[in-house]
Amino acid sequence: MAGQTTNPLGTYLRDRRTRLDPVAFGFVGGRRRTPGLRREEVASRANISPTWYTWLEQGRGGAPSADVLDRIAKGLMLTEPEREHLYMLGLGRPPEARYRAVDGISPRLQRTLDGMPLSPAIIKTALWDVVGWNRAAALMLTDYSKLPREGRNILRLMFGNDRVRARNADWESIGRFVVGAFRADVARAGAGTSAEAARLVAELSRISPEFEAFWRDNDVVSHGEGVKRIHHPDAGLLEMEFSSFTVEGRPELGMIIYNPASPASAERLRALVEDLDR
């Protein structure tokens, strides 16, 4: 019990290694005094010295480096939440975000979107590529299924598509807000220095003087919540509240959910969805 209190990192490491099957990792099985991998086996997989790993489990030797924790996480085949917990125990902070390109979303996440028939909702990446949407979003915003993959980027639509621009009331305010939120998102997801982000910023700066000016302002804003006013060709003016959420365990993915901000907008949105069902 005292070990759990004074050395939570060591307790966690011991727990993780004792759950692993030595045979599955190419080590000799058979009778062992304790289940799971031995300390020297974990050290070998993590490419660190057995002595240093033993000290970590015993609470000696000081705080490990991020590199050592990453090696141990890989050696123990930790999941991303388990790796984050290892960092919190070892360094008192989560690991730096690692950007991962995303092509689509899981069926479960798509069912979550589809379960909100009267609330337009999308899933976007840190680079603001739309990778998931529901039918209400396709009706109110854009039918992303009719666009090529590279055309589903919110920034490209905002700054490079005259039709989308015309449908956004208060376009300049929305455009400035979107650029500030985009800057915050790419930094949070560890994509700020990626080649993909640099290419997107260069492209948008080339095609849109407004984007270039907004980007140079270096504003950073939270995309948490707000109100969006849309001139829809069939439904008329829609005033929509939006809320943004990070997908758990996927810092590079964000969900945006829209809900009518007035009874009139709710009625217009409902009519838009019901007309498609007739």
Image (cartoon, rainbow, N blue to C red):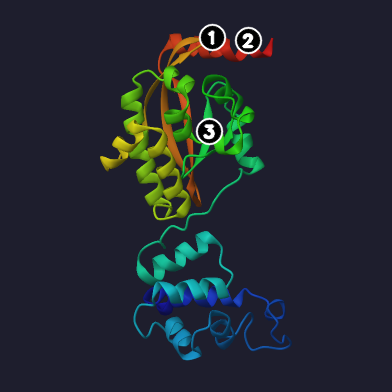
Res 245 → quadrant: top left
**Residue 33 pos. (x, y %):** 64, 89
Say what secondary structure mark 3 lies in: strand
How many residues crowd around disc 2 within 10 Å: few (fewer than 14), some, or many (20 or more)? few
Of labels 1 and 2, earlier in sequence is 1
Say what secondary structure mark 2 lies in: helix
Please identify the quadrant where the C terminus is shown. top right
**Residue 111 pos. (x, y %):** 64, 35
* Distance from Cα at disc 3 to Cα at disc 1: 21 Å
Name the residue carrying label 3: 122
Residue at (36, 63) in percent of width and height: 93
* Distance from Cα at disc 2 to Cα at disc 3: 21 Å
Front-most of residues 56 and 148:
148
Residue at (36, 29) in percent of width and height: 175
Residue type (three-letter) at the residue carrying disc 2: Asp
Residue type (three-letter) at the residue carrying disc 1: Asp
Res 23 → quadrant: bottom right
The disc at residue 275 is: 2
Name the residue carrying label 1: 234
**39 with respect to 65 (left or right):** right
